[in-house]
Amino acid sequence: MPTVNVCVDYGPPDANPAAGSVYIFFSADDVSEAELKQSINALALALRSDFALLKIDTEAFGSPSVLQENILGRIIRGRERRLQLRR
């Protein structure tokens, strides 16, 4: 989002995954509170729409793992088709 700047600290390079990361969000320079609220609301609306589609897909396929397998299968079949077209 152009109205937000993000700083990421992944922690020490030799730390294990449980050490965690930190994401810090700042409003971008010269962005009003109204602009920031508008962009956050637009993002929230888009995410709710995406989650609703994922929920429909998940319900149709039974579980998230089945959905993942279905998506992976689509990707693999697409790659296979592209390889066949190149030959």
Image (cartoon, rainbow, N blue to C red):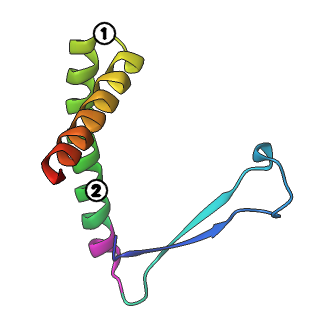
Residue 18: x %, y % from top left: 78, 43
Vertical placement of residue 72 versus 81, above or below: above
Residue 51: x %, y % from top left: 28, 35
Residue sticking out furthest to the right: 14
Residue sticking out furthest to the bottom: 30
Which residue is pictured at 33% across the width and 81% down the height? 32
Which residue is pictured at 36% across the width and 23% down the height? 69
Name the residue type under label 2: Leu
| Label total for image | 2
Which residue is pictured at 36% across the width and 13% down the height? 63
Residue 17: x %, y % from top left: 75, 46
The answer to the question of whether label 1 and label 2 lie on touching residues, with beta carbons closer than 8 A, is no
Vertical placement of residue 33 versus 64, above or below: below
Task: Determine whether the residue tagged by mark 2 lies in a helix, strand or loop.
Answer: helix
Instruction: Please report whichever mark, 1 or 2, sits nearer to the chain's N-terminal start.
Output: 2
Is 82 left or right of 16, judged from the image as shown?
left
- The kind of secondary structure the magenta stretch mainly shows is helix
Name the residue type under label 1: Gly
Which quarter shows the N terminus? bottom left
- Identify the residue position indicated by label 2 in the image: 43
Is 39 left or right of 23, judged from the image as shown?
left
Vertical placement of residue 42 versus 32, above or below: above
Residue 25: x %, y % from top left: 53, 67
Span of residues in magenta: 31-36
Vertical placement of residue 28 versus 44, above or below: below
Task: Determine whether the residue tagged by mark 1 lies in a helix, strand or loop.
Answer: loop
The image quarter in which residue 56 lies? top left
- Identify the residue position indicated by label 1 in the image: 62
Q: Is residue 32 magenta?
A: yes
Camera-side residue of 5 and 12: 12
Which residue is pictured at 33% across the width and 71% down the height? 36
